[in-house]
Image (cartoon, rainbow, N blue to C red):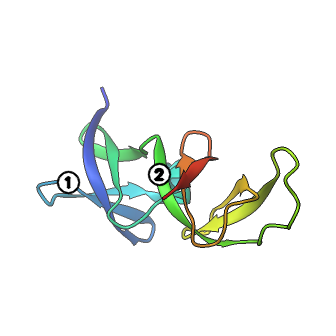
Amino acid sequence: MPERKECTYSYFADPMYVFMDADYNQFEVEGENMGDALNYLDDGMPMDVIFYDGKAISVEMPNSVVREVIYTEPAIKGDTSGKVMKPAKISTGFLIPVPIFVATGDKIEIDTRTGEYRNRVK
């Protein structure tokens, strides 16, 4: 039966991602088992590490994360028709479609289950 333990992301030691629990124990998860978590991974990020037979085998992300937009195209004046989306890049290099009003430097909430923009965060 798989077990889970809350840990924080520490660092990348190719090909392993290293996590640490509250007691400073380190656990390594292979890059190929990280899945979509790599799109959002940030230093010190809390997430659940999944264990099977005492071995760390994968991670489970929080349902949403807040990330800063490091680049997106400026809004086009007058383009307010419906649900216009444009690509925005976050610090991991991941591109996510965001509404036209989102600007570089904005913090956005992302649903990690779907990879979709949720809202802008103040």
The number of callouts visible is: 2
Amino acid type, residue under disc 1 in the picture: Asp
Query: Percent from the top left, x then y, of residue 111?
Result: 55, 43
**41 left or right of 84 in image:** left
- Please tell me which residue is depicted at 42% across the width and 64% down the height of the picture: 42
Q: Quadrant for the N terminus, please.
A: top left
- Please tell me which residue is depicted at 26% across the width and 52% down the height of the picture: 7
Q: Nearer the viewer, residue 18 or 39?
A: 39
Query: Percent from the top left, x then y, of residue 66?
Result: 48, 56
Give the mark nearer the N terminus: 2 vs 1: 1
Query: Percent from the top left, x then y, of residue 19?
Result: 30, 59
Amino acid type, residue under disc 2 in the picture: Val
> Residue under circle 2?
65
- Please tell me which residue is depicted at 35% across the width and 48% down the height of the picture: 47
Disc number for residue 21: 1
Disc number for residue 108: none
Q: Is residue 4 above or below residue 76?
A: above
Q: Is residue 36 above or below residue 15?
A: above
| Other residues around mark 2 within 10 Å, as few (<14) / some (14–19) / many (≥20) | some
Q: Quadrant of residue 61?
A: top left
Q: Quadrant of residue 113?
A: top right
- Please tell me which residue is depicted at 86% across the width and 67% down the height of the picture: 77
Query: Percent from the top left, x then y, of residue 98?
Result: 70, 55
Q: Secondary structure at mark 1?
A: loop
**81 left or right of 60 in image:** right
| Other residues around mark 1 within 10 Å, as few (<14) / some (14–19) / many (≥20) | some
Q: Nearer the viewer, residue 18 or 119?
A: 119
Q: Quadrant of residue 58?
A: top left
Q: Secondary structure at mark 2?
A: strand
Q: Nearer the viewer, residue 45 or 75?
A: 75
Q: Is residue 80 above or below residue 113?
A: below
Mark 2 → mark 1, Cα distance in angstroms:
20 Å
